[in-house]
Image (spheres, rainbow, N blue to C red):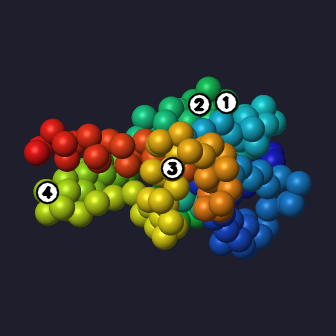
Amino acid sequence: MERYGYIRVSTKEQNPERQFIAMKEQQIKQKNIFLDKVSGQDFSRPQYTRLLKKLKKGDVIIIKSIDRLGRNYEEILEQWRRITKEIGADIQVIDMPLLNTNSFHEDLTGVFISDLVLQILAYVAETERAFIKQRQAEGIAAAKQKGVKFGCKKAELPKEFEKYYQMWNEGKISLRKAAEILKMKHTTFYRRCVERKGVVKENCFKL
């Protein structure tokens, strides 16, 4: 029987040290610890895939918390089923011993309770995430109604932008030359000129 530790952090910036400490306290061999740094958009987990290939019946996979197995309710349940039912390995959840399948859950009743608790926890976690997203969306909508603007603030234009915009618009200077004098990227200068034209046109229609 082998004991493996699996660590997952959601971004490259997030520190996995807390999970490493938990694995050391469980006396997991360094070679048996697998780490994935996964972004929210790209959930491919190469180290987790390697771990599953090594995992055999009777082995134990140790995780800090249940959400390390997946990023949503369905995924957590699928990985739980795959490990415990298909492979026949056990799962030990450090933060939630009630879920451990390798300790006092040896009879069918214990396994049933473990699976039931898992489904309840996974459902609650997924529901809470959905509520958070809903509250964020409602907050953004309310802020927009009040006139709050989101996104990066545009950099202020150089003082002489208007002068060189007019010269460029009248064909008296090239776009690149005007941008160079104003110390702007030519693409930025062109974009702001287009915006400037749009404002002028809109004001003309209002008149």
First in sequence, mark 4 or 1: give its number.
1
**Secondary structure beneath label 2:** helix
Q: Residue at x 43, y 42 (%)?
A: 194
Alpha-carbon span between mark 4 and mark 1: 53 Å
Q: Residues within 10 Å of mark 1 (few under 14, many from 20)?
A: some
Indicate the quadrant containing the C terminus: top left, top right, bottom left or bottom right. Answer: top left
Q: Are marks 3 and 4 in contact (CB under 8 Å)?
A: no
Tell me the amino acid under the disc marked 4: Gln
Q: Nearer the viewer, mark 1 or mark 3?
A: 3
Q: Are marks 2 and 1 in contact (CB under 8 Å)?
A: yes
First in sequence, mark 4 or 2: give its number.
2
Tell me the amino acid under the disc marked 1: Ile
Q: Residue at x 44, y 59 (%)?
A: 162
Tell me the amino acid under the disc marked 2: Arg
Give residue 82's mark: 2
Q: Nearer the viewer, mark 3 or mark 4?
A: 3
From the viewer's perspective, tell me whether residue 82 is left or right of residue 202: right
Q: Residue at x 67, y 68 (%)?
A: 15
Where does label 4 land, which residue? Answer: 145
Where does label 1 land, which residue? Answer: 87
Question: x and y percent of residue 127 in the render?
Answer: 29, 48
From the viewer's perspective, tell me whether residue 179 is left or right of residue 136: right
Residue 200, placed above or below residue 155: above
**Secondary structure beneath label 3:** helix
Alpha-carbon span between mark 3 and mark 4: 39 Å
Where does label 3 land, which residue? Answer: 167
Alpha-carbon span between mark 2 and mark 1: 6 Å
**Secondary structure beneath label 4:** helix
Indicate the quadrant containing the N terminus: top left, top right, bottom left or bottom right. Answer: top right
First in sequence, mark 3 or 2: give its number.
2
Which of the 4 image quarters holds residue 184? bottom right
Question: x and y percent of residue 93 in the render?
Answer: 57, 57
